[in-house]
Amino acid sequence: VHPARLGGLWVGTDGGGLHRLSQEGVSYVPLDGGGERVWAVLEDSRTNLWVGTENGLYRLGEGGLTNFGLATQSLSIRALHEDAQG
């Protein structure tokens, strides 16, 4: 769970994918290839959404969804952190 900058919460689930909870309700965010197990979620200072899944690391930003190539290594990302320098 991570707070969304525009209000609400980002919620990763163990088998149900990524969701955003807001006053308007719950919305599902598809992660093509990312799998349905979302272990970590972080909205950075530039409002990119970083998502650690059972199949690697993804970033959801203005350009859409980016896979950082880690999915091919079957690498689970279980924690994310933005340091003081961004």
Image (spheres, rainbow, N blue to C red):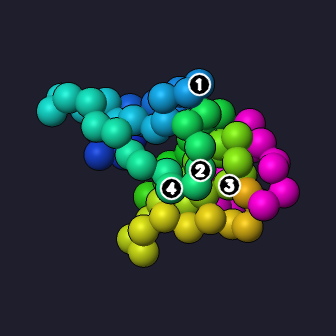
Q: Residue at x 70, y 40 (%)?
A: 54
Residue with the mark numbered 4: 32
Three-letter amino acid code at the position of disc 2: Gly
Three-letter amino acid code at the position of disc 4: Asp
Give the structural element (helix, strand or loop) at label 4. loop
Judge left or right: residue 64 versus residue 34: left
Q: Residue at x 49, y 36 (%)?
A: 17
Q: Earlier in the sequence, mark 3 or mark 4?
A: 4
Residue with the mark numbered 3: 57
Quarter of the image where one finds residue 41? top right
Q: Main secondary structure of the magenta part?
A: loop
Residue with the mark numbered 2: 34
Q: Residue at x 56, y 67 (%)?
A: 66
Q: Nearer the viewer, mark 3 or mark 2?
A: 2
Which class describes the residues within 10 Å of circle 3: few (<14), some (14-19), or many (20+)?
Answer: many
Residue 73, percent from left and from top? 84, 57
Q: Residue at x 50, y 56 (%)?
A: 32
> For the residues marked 3 and 1, what is the alpha-carbon distance in whole angstroms?
16 Å
Three-letter amino acid code at the position of disc 1: Asp
> For the residues marked 1 and 4, what is the alpha-carbon distance in whole angstroms?
16 Å
> For the residues marked 3 and 2, what is the alpha-carbon distance in whole angstroms?
8 Å
Q: Which mark is residue 14?
A: 1
